[in-house]
Image (tube, rainbow, N blue to C red):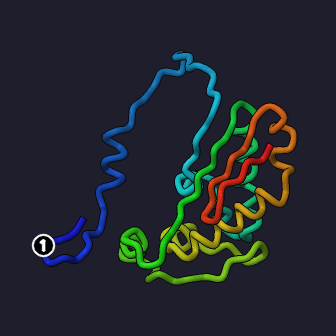
Amino acid sequence: MFNYSGDIRKGKAKAQLKKQLQVEMLSRNVLPKVKCRVLDSSAVLWVIHWPANGTVRDFVVNFKQYIQQKLTSSDVYLVFDRYQDFSTRSTTRCNRSTEACRVHRLALDTPLPPQKVVLTVSENKSQLMEIICEELTRDTTPHRDYTMTHKLVITSSNNTLLLK
C-alpha cells in the first residue's frame, strides 16, 4: 500500500486482476433461486446507466429501477460505503483522479456531472449516495409492490433501514 518513502501507492492493476478472476458460465447451467442479494452500492453506481445530459434525479430514477428489478425475485441488502475524512481510501481516490478532486454541490435538479467526476471524488460520491438513500426511504414506490414478499435493507452512512 505504501512506498518505502512512506508515500501511498496509486492502485492501477485492479482492472487487470478483475479480468483474471472473471469466469464465464454457460447459460444452460441452472442456478438455484436466490433468496437474498447483498449489493455493494459503490459497484452498482458504476454499472447503472449514467445519463450524459441528464440531472441527478435522472440517475436516481435509474438506480431505483435497478433496485426494483432486484426486489422482484429476492430480498435486497443495499450497502453504501462510509467515507471518513482523511482516510487512506479518500486520498487514493483523489490521487487517481484526473479531475483534480473537483467537488460539486449535488441536488436532485442539478445537471449530472460526468460519471468519473462524481464517482472518483469521495465528497461527490458521498453526496450522491446520500441523495439516493433519502429518495429510497422517502418514496416507497420502487419497492412498495415487492416488499410484501421481499424486503429492502439499506445500510447508509448514517444508519441501517429496513423497508418492508
In which image quadrant can residue 4 be found? bottom left
Q: Which residue is mark 1?
A: 4
Q: How many marks?
A: 1
Label 1 neighbourhood size at 10 Å, few (<14), some (14-19), many (20+)?
few
Q: Which residue lies at the image location 48% right of the left edge and 21% below the top edge?
A: 26
Q: Does residue 150 sit above or below 30 in this rendering?
A: below
Q: Residue at x 76, y 72 (%)?
A: 108
Decide which of 63, 5 is in the foreground and name it: 5
Residue 105: image location, x then y, percent: 66, 82
Left or right of 108 on screen, residue 42: left
Looking at the picture, which amino acid does disc 1 mark?
Answer: Tyr
Task: Check the image and report above or below for 66 versus 2.
Answer: above
User: In the rendered image of this protein, does residue 60 appear above or below residue 72?
Assistant: below
User: Which quarter of the picture shows residue 57?
Assistant: bottom right
Picture coordinates of residue 148 (x, y %)?
84, 35
Residue 38 spot, x, y in % from top left = 58, 42
- Placement of the N terminus among the 4 image quadrants: bottom left
Quadrant of residue 86 within the rendered picture: bottom left
Q: Residue furthest front?
A: 159
